[in-house]
Image (tube, grey):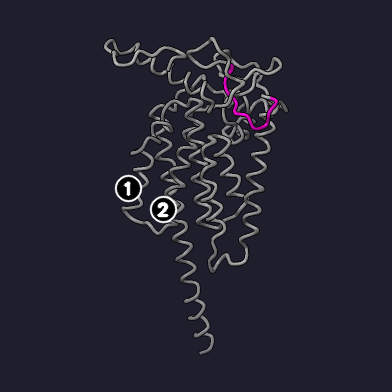
Amino acid sequence: MKEASLTTATASVNEPNQAVADNRTRDAAVLIAIFLLFWGIYLATGCYQRNPFNAHVYLAYSLLRGRFDLINPPGYFETVQTAGRSYIAYGIGPSLLMLPCVAIWGMDFHQAAFMAALSTGAVTIWSSTLRRLGIHGQARSLLTVSFGLGSLFWFYGGANGTTWSLMHVTTVFGLTFAIHETLGKRRGWLVGLAFGIAVLSRQPALLSLPFFAGMLWRDDAETAGRRVNREIWFFLGLGALMAFDAFYNFLALRQPFRQRLPARHPGDDRRPLSNVGNFQLQVRRSKRAYLLSAAAGKFARFSLVRPHHGRL
């Protein structure tokens, strides 16, 4: 009699555990299917082609050989020239992520396919985040498809693997990963690294710092008493990447906190811009003049504005 009751009790305990395991397996299968589906879509819509503007592959290749300057970069790369060496003029976050891949495939690594994988990873993480927010069924499916195919993210993630698109996709991937982690185990070091990769790709991502700090600080029954530890690990992970970026800036510009810019702005070969910040007025005027001049050249009846460099 006792043995029968014990067996019944054991079975009743194992049933919930088995249900949880089945749900996890089913959800993992759904996420894998989402990844494969969107990766195929992004590859088919443009990322299957190799792109010659693969400066981040060059940087990853150099880092693996103990160098911070680009090794024999093509002349069409936008670079910062310092002491006869060429440094990348963009965020270095994507290069850090692709280090293991470049270590295997070298300079033949397919940057566009990598960008498609990052884009697909962001969509997959977004779908998992919806589940953590309690959104299931058709609503979760619609929001996943809307993010992956119904927004500008498809334009970047499934385009052609250019350097600028890769930085945008890497930023979205890092932020999405960090948000997903803050809704889960909230490991501060992991949130800090993901957020740091986003910042090292697109600096405006730093504006979301209060959100992540607040999400890690918030208290509940599962994380009571561990807020300070999470905050410390978060800033350690973020600080490590920011310190590396500052060191790279020091090598390229001899100043750790100055924005890197190409030696010359596209469309204006008369004035070097590597010694000014990205938000300086002269840079913004130059960009505005260049864009308006290009528009005037395309439209024959562009009579309302007659742009001229330096007179806007």
Looking at this view, name the residue that lies furthest to the bottom: 1
Q: Position of residue 269 (x, y in %)?
A: 53, 10
Looking at the image, residue 7 sits to the left or right of residue 242; the answer is: left
Image height check: is 265 above or below 64? above
Amino acid type at image mark 1: Leu
Q: Which mark is residue 142?
A: 1
Looking at this view, name the residue that lies furthest to the right: 66
Q: What residue sits 51% from the left and 19% below the top?
A: 52
Q: Position of residue 20 (x, y in %)?
A: 47, 64
Looking at the image, residue 272 sits to the left or right of residue 41; the answer is: right
Q: Position of residue 93 (x, y in %)?
A: 58, 34
Q: Quadrant of residue 104?
A: top right
Front in this rendered view, residue 170 or 138: 170
Front in this rendered view, residue 295 or 239: 295
Cα gap from disc 1 to disc 2, whole angstroms? 11 Å
Q: What residue sits 56% from the left and 38% below the top?
A: 199
Q: Which residue is mark 2?
A: 130
Which range is magenta? Answer: 254-263
Chief SS of the magenta region: loop
